[in-house]
Image (cartoon, grey):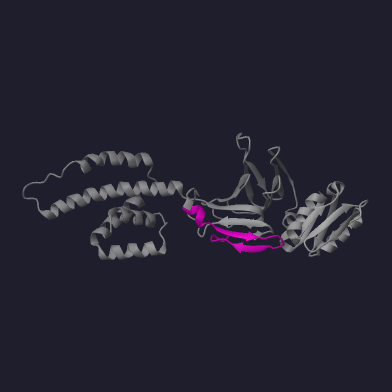
């Protein structure tokens, strides 16, 4: 085994990044090679003693060691081959300590950052189509409810100093508490960061806003401004709701009833003075049928209603009793017009 491979394996083992196969490879090497075992013990001891070592320390130590590495080993005529080996082992071990410390520092510094192509390709994707909802549990114990027309990307195993996922759509999170590893949700137009809490996020790519509603705990929302101006972090606590408007780059925070914001989990739809166009988008995702407005007036109707496990036809029937409009349900779509326009 080459020295570079040895250092790579030991680096991954000490930093907790080694796979099961790599751990087996390391154990086999250490049991078969006494010198490699001795080097590992030295490196392990050094790492434990210098866990907080910084980059300047590594560079300084390397500069001190460099002349010894470059200079030839001078020994007395009676020096035995064994002594030469010991001298070289001591220098090599010291060099290994610096190299492996630098390697581990790099791993620690970059842990949790999803920047490489390999990491992006390694993400697992869970996607719900329209009309489909699901639940899942992440490797850290975080439980997630995914709404219809929603996509979540996450790693097979969280490593490093953060837990990061990517969301497009709507989801309710019950984040497993781990103060040492913040949970970060990347959205198309912002980022949500938490330590351990429960909250609902709505961030559909085809909508011009993001909504975040907190049931328990605290959430930090960092918007991504198109103008490039400084990002202002918005902090939310229980029973508060954020609505971030992309076009205005404006964050509105108001009190809310979190149970209503997450009511979709139990098959409940709650509309509070929403435009019919917004309600139509909700119905389209929930039932998988395209909503087509034949009248612009109907889009602007403001409607209120609460429905628990009702059919699409039932919901439209009861809404039409509060505000007059016409509708027709076909196999693939729903046609809607105002009360003055008949639907053929």
Residue 51 appearing in the image? no
Viewport quadrant of the N terminus: bottom left
In this rendering, the count of numbered labels is 0
Residue 40 lies, in percent from the top left, at 30, 57
Residue 327 lies, in percent from the top left, at 87, 57
Q: Residue 60 in magenta?
A: no
Residue 237 appearing in the image? yes
Q: Residue 138 in magenta?
A: yes
Residue occupying image coordinates x 85% and y 63%: 314
Viewport quadrant of the C terminus: bottom right
Check the image and report above or below for 221 versus 259: above
Residue 267 lies, in percent from the top left, at 75, 63
Front residue of 198/169: it is 169
Left or right: 270, with 31 as reference point: right
Left or right: 82, with 310 as reference point: left
Check the image and report above or below for 165 versus 209: below
Left or right: 144, with 292 as reference point: left
* Residue at the farthest left position: 77
Residue 203 lies, in percent from the top left, at 67, 50
Residue occupying image coordinates x 91% and y 55%: 342
Front residue of 329/318: it is 329
Residue occupying image coordinates x 81% and y 58%: 334
* Residue at the farthest front position: 344
On the image, which quarter does residue 232 sit in?
top right
Q: Which residues are magenta?
A: 118-143
């Amino acid at each position: 085994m080459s020295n570079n491979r040895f250092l790579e394996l030991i680096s991954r083992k000490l930093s907790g990044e080694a796979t099961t196969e790599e751990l087996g490879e390391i154990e086999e090497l250490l049991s078969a090679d006494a010198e490699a075992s001795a080097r590992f013990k030295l490196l392990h001891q050094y790492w434990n003693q210098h866990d907080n070592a910084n980059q300047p320390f590594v560079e300084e130590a390397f500069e001190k060691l460099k002349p010894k590495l470059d200079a030839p080993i001078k020994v007395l005529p009676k020096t035995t081959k064994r002594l030469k080996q010991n001298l070289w082992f001591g220098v090599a071990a010291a060099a290994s300590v610096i190299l492996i410390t630098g390697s581990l520092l790099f791993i620690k510094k970059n842990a949790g950052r999803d920047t490489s192509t390999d990491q992006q390709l390694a993400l697992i994707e869970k996607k719900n189509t329209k009309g489909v909802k699901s639940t899942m549990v992440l490797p850290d114990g975080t439980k997630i409810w995914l709404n219809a027309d929603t996509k979540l990307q996450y790693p097979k195993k969280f490593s490093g100093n953060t837990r990061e996922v990517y969301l497009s759509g709507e989801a309710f999170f019950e984040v497993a508490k781990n103060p040492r590893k913040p949970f970060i949700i990347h959205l198309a137009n912002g980022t949500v960061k938490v330590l351990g809490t429960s909250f609902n996020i709505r961030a559909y790519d085809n909508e011009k806003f993001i909504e975040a509603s907190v049931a328990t705990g605290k959430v930090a929302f960092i918007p991504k401004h198109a103008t490039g101006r400084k990002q202002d972090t918005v902090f939310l606590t229980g029973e508060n709701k954020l609505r971030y408007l992309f076009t205005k780059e404006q964050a509105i925070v108001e009190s809310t009833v979190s149970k209503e914001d997450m009511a979709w989990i139990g098959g409940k739809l709650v509309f509070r003075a929403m435009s019919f166009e917004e309600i139509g988008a909700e119905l389209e995702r929930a039932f998988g049928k395209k909503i087509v407005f034949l009248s612009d007036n109907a889009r602007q109707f403001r409607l209120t209603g609460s429905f628990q496990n009702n059919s699409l036809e039932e919901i439209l029937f009861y809404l039409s009793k509060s505000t007059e409009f016409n509708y027709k349900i076909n196999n693939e779509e729903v046609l809607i017009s105002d009360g003055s326009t008949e639907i053929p």
